[in-house]
Amino acid sequence: MTTAAQVSGRPAKPPRSRALIAGIVAFVVITAISVSERFGIGLDIVELIGDLWRVQPILEQLVSPNWEFLPKVVDPMLETLQIAIIAAFIGCGIALPISFLASRTTVPNRPTLTITRGILSVVRAIPDFLYALIFVAAVGIGPLPGILALIFFNIGVVAKLLSETIDGVDPGPIEAADAGGSTRTQMVRWSVLPQVLPNYVAFSLYAFELNVRASTVLGFVGAGGIGFLLKVQYGFSLWSNVSVIIISLFVVVFFIEIVSIRLRRRLV
Amino acid sequence: MAMGTTTGRPEKPSNLKRNLWILGAAALFLWAAISVNVDITDLAALPSGLWAILTAMFPPEWSYLENAVPAMIESLQMAWVGTIIGAVLSLPLGFLGARNVSSPLVSNIMRQILNAIRAFPELILAIAIFIPIAGFGPVAGALAIGIHSAGTLGKLTAEAIEGIDEGPMEAARATGARGLQVQRWGVVPQVLPELVGFWLYRFEINIRAGAVLGVVGAGGIGFLLQQTITFTQWPKAGTTILVVIVATIIVDTISGTVRRRIIEGSEARTVAEVDLVAKAQIDGAGSA
């Protein structure tokens, strides 16, 4: 860094990269606009701190859950699990072949890749809640629209993760299959699939977890499960019942996460 | 396999364990499919129902862009501010949660706190905590997004810090740095690129997660989506949905490009990228 002439003092600082400066400026400008009262959401931290006390009456009820309500939580919670399981199986099943069409490594030709990726980015751009609204409008309220919504949601999540995993597989087995004269399908089956299978199972477990977490959202728009119960109790401001729902969901999510982490560790 | 076998293929390894797993999974699926309260004949209404909705949405009512675009901007701003709140809070939480820079006791407690925060979805945080405090509107939504994100980002930050090279920390200590100085010069430079990647990724997730908040009055485009679809104003719904899709794809593209640029240079690009996204998703769980 230092030339022979520079004998004393610190070496000169390297110049900051232009991209970094542009990034920082963009960050500051977007943030300033976003928090401003006039052009943004109007975030006033001082006022917020002054209003913190408003939550106190609700918190008081939330910390004293009405346990007599617990039996009413069981059935909707089971429905949430059923919705999550069915959607995860079907959604991840559909995502598997799509992933091979969305990866550079395994796609038969360029146009297929472009089209598949285009469709996938639209599928992922639609939030779970919007799918739920649309399917409730199409088939009526109940668990069915919830299942349909989560299927699309899972296709989006799993196909993205898996296709990117396929992009990064070890090319050795693929070359071996090619050298052995295998067809594309055989190559995928024997060279690529074994490499990505553990990841695929891990992503599917993750999709299932997401589905259970999504249940609050689904129920709020009529797509079945625990969220609907939550909506009703919230509508009547029965916070000690809401508290039971939150705690139950907490326990179920926690339990699923533990099982899922164990399973994933075994796989990877 | 054994010495004695001289001809034929080697024996196949046992598949018993794998088959049991598959059987268990199949049983689970069957239980769910049989016991769920769904009349399968309702499914027959799906194609015609969807088709009716799609055709009713086109052509979209373009004048409704006047409402949809500002609402989408509000959604983006909510997600942006929420992500910043989450990122800022996640730094101290993450440092305290990392075993190698914090003490074992503190890091364990912090991990449990982070898990607990993560378990509350944005929707519940909004209705139970932040709407009462901040009133209806996007501030409540941004705060709900922010707190939930702090849980996920905090966990990812802690894990990123646990993966660092200890050398620079030792070097910083050797020059006389202490406490926060060690963190600033020995830890932050190592994890910052990864963290910025997580933040951007979280921003993408938060745009989607924020959509539902409009339903409970916590701001953003969700309210318009629900109103137009519930009241079957399909041309307006079509416009709103298009705005959501286009805006989300644009943001994803920009964010993806920036993320790639940040990670670029250390390793092969795609592998690092997949790793980051998979890690953020798997460990961070919770786009919903």
Image: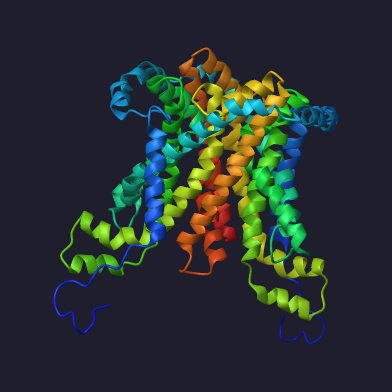
Looking at the image, residue A189 sits to the left or right of residue A21; the answer is: right
Pick whichever, B20 or A121, lies toward us. Answer: A121
Q: Residue B8: image x %, image y %?
A: 82, 82
Q: Residue at x 30, y 49 (%)?
A: B105
Quarter of the rendering occupied by the N terminus of chain A: bottom left
Residue A96 seen in the figure: no
Question: Which sits in the foreground, B4 or B285?
Answer: B285
Residue drawn at the location 77% of the way across and 81% of the way down: A179
As drawn, which residue projects farthest toward the left?
A8
B56 relative to B196, above or below: above
Say above or below: B32 vs A266: above
Front residue of this view, candidates B198 and B157:
B198
Q: Quadrant of the C terminus of chain A?
A: bottom right
Q: In the current view of this chain or complex, which residue is farthest to the front?
A: B63
Q: Quadrant of residue A36?
A: top left
Color encoding of the figure: rainbow
Let me know if residue A184 appears in the view: yes
The answer to whether A9 is drawn above or below residue A203 in the figure is below
Q: Is residue B71 above or below residue B179?
A: above
Residue B54: horizontal and vertical position, in percent?
A: 77, 31
Outermost residue, top side: A236
